[in-house]
Image: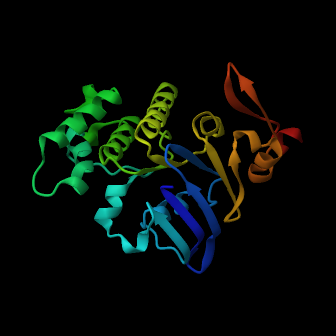
Amino acid sequence: MILNVQELGFLYRNHEVLHDIAFNVSHGEIVAILGPNGVGKTTLLKCLNKILKTKTGNIYLDGTEIRRLDTLEIARRAGYVPQRVETGRLTAFDAVLLGRRPHISWDISDNDLRIVDAIFSRLSMNHLRLSYIDEMSGGELQKIAIARALVQEPRILLLDEPTSSLDLKNQVEILSTIVDIVREHGIAAVMTLHDLNQALRFADRFIFLKDGNIHFHGDFDTVTPDIIEDVYGLPVMMGMVGGVRCIVPGLCPCEAS
């Protein structure tokens, strides 16, 4: 087990945002956090690497409670990709190389450079190596942020809407690469997503949040249209198209009227 979350609670200005959140993530596993806007998906992700301080509960990363880990040690174990990526006058190569900082004791090594080179090739980003990130599109920046997290060689990836700025082809390519890396290296990933079809296709388990609680937690075989309607307030149909799991939204109440 890489991640163990026990009875997590979080308050914002005395308002309870998350309550009694508990789940585990194992080696080689991808978990998707799902739910409507404002339900606390990003907040939960930020609690998992101590960006936000929880009110109650415990979070164990590789068996160690994260409150006992400093920022550098957390960065060695968890690679975090936020929704919004800050820019600066850096080349893409230098921006990704920053992901090696938790592992650099004195100076950049040949191994650090090899790791960055390998990620640029794996994500088909070699054409961006010398481009400045403050001149990039949102989709290109998103890929840079994912690459920076991967070169950290973390035990777990924490990805907040990792495909939000990507076109359809890049969405599939990035998520497929994340799945491959998680499986190959026996690490784990937790990601928030709005696109349920992406979640069903690429994740192993799903956590549906509603009203600050876990409304449902399970795998594809246990997710039902009723669960999704309970969470999103919209009827759906579920099935397989060309061997791919998919969800088709039904009529919105406003359309039915």
Residue 183 vertical placement versus 6 (above, below): above
Seen from the viewer's position, the closer of residues 106 and 257 is 106
Q: Is residue 213 left or right of residue 57?
A: right
- Residue 39 is drawn in which quadrant? bottom right
Residue at left 57%, top 48%? 31
How does the figure colour the protein chain or chains?
A: rainbow
Quadrant for the C terminus in the image = top right
Instruction: Say how many tags the image has.
Output: 0
Residue lying farthest to the bottom in this orientation: 14
- Residue 51 is drawn in which quadrant? bottom left
Residue 152 vertical placement versus 210 (above, below): above
Q: Is residue 214 left or right of residue 129?
A: right
Residue at left 44%, top 43%? 186
Q: Residue 5, percent across and down?
A: 56, 64
Q: Residue 151, percent across and down?
A: 30, 43
Residue at left 61%, top 40%? 199
Q: Residue 176, percent across and down?
A: 49, 31
Seen from the viewer's position, the closer of residues 223 and 170 is 223
Residue 60 vertical placement versus 176 (above, below): below
Q: Residue 33, percent across and down?
A: 60, 51
Seen from the viewer's position, the closer of residues 157 and 167 is 157
Residue at left 49%, top 25%? 169
Q: Is residue 83 left or right of residue 128?
A: right
- Residue 144 is drawn in which quadrant? top left
Residue 70 vertical placement versus 107 (above, below): below
Residue lying farthest to the left in this orientation: 107
Residue lying farthest to the right in this orientation: 257
